Amino acid sequence: MKLPFKLDDDTQRKKSLGLIVLSVDETIEDEFRPLFSRDDATLYHSRIESAPEVTSETLAGMKDRLADAARLLPTTRPLDVVGYACTSGATVIGSDQVAATLHSVQPGAAVTDPARAVIAALHRLNVSAIGVVSPYVAEVSDAICALLAQNRLSPVKVGSFGQAEEAVVARIALQSVEDAICAVGEDPCVEAVFASCTNLRTLKVLERCEQRLGKPVISSNQALAWHMMTLAVLPVKGAGPGRLFNC
């Protein structure tokens, strides 16, 4: 028995966003889920092979795999935005190179990544003296700080968990993350705190940290979600936690 059916254009009325996630990332999809639980957008995921340890060499190695990961996103209709979900990877490869590679596969999509998104978010919040919380080893943390400095943002206080192993980063306790953000952010010279890395769990403590510190706190995942929504011309105000989604 062949059953009758009709087609509708429900998906055509929604903005279509693609997210390229590291194969070792255990956090970003869980944190994006509540942010994109909305009727006006559809979020598709693809995975890119990534090393279990974070070094400049392993991060740079993802450059040649970006296009293949983008090709695994749906192609029934053009995507509005594609995000590459790796802060340190985008920093080492370069956001412009990431965008050029993804545009070669998704030419009509706006492209962003956490590095580009964080810079846009900090400028949107009108802050320049930044406290940085990093899970990374020194060479990667230094690259993040250098990128901020190149974009008129001063990393005035930096704290790091000093971890190269992604599996460890994904399991750092929320209380440890909150305590680290507040330890860095309590410095009176710090205007806002940036917690880096898509694999570091942050979303549930951002507002509590802001309340404790009385200043903005942003994370890689929060900033990337905000920037993807902004580029897709989706309503942003109130769509997520913290001052970034309410400024």
Image: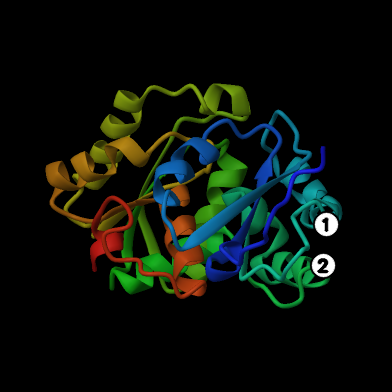
- Answer whether residue 114 is visible to the viewer in this image: no
**Quadrant of the image occupied by residue 109:** bottom right
- Neighbor class of circle 2 (other Cα within 10 Å; few <14, some 14-19, many 20+) is some
Which of the pair 194/232 is nearer the observer? 232
Cα gap from disc 2 to disc 1, whole angstroms: 6 Å
Residue at (52% x, 27% y) in the render = 170
Decide: is 151 above or below 52. below
| Contact? badges 2 and 1 (CB < 8 Å) | yes
Q: Position of residue 28 (x, y in %)?
A: 52, 40
Which residue is tagged 1?
Answer: 71
**Quadrant of the image occupied by residue 18:** bottom right
Q: Which mark is residue 56?
A: none
**Residue type, mark 2 in image:** Val
Q: Secondary structure at mark 1?
A: helix
Q: Secondary structure at mark 2?
A: loop
**Quadrant of the image occupied by residue 237:** bottom left
Which of the pair 101/235 is nearer the observer? 235
In the picture, measured across the screen, residue 247 lies left or right of residue 213, that is right
Q: Which mark is residue 105?
A: 2
In the picture, measured across the screen, residue 119 lies left or right of residue 188, that is right
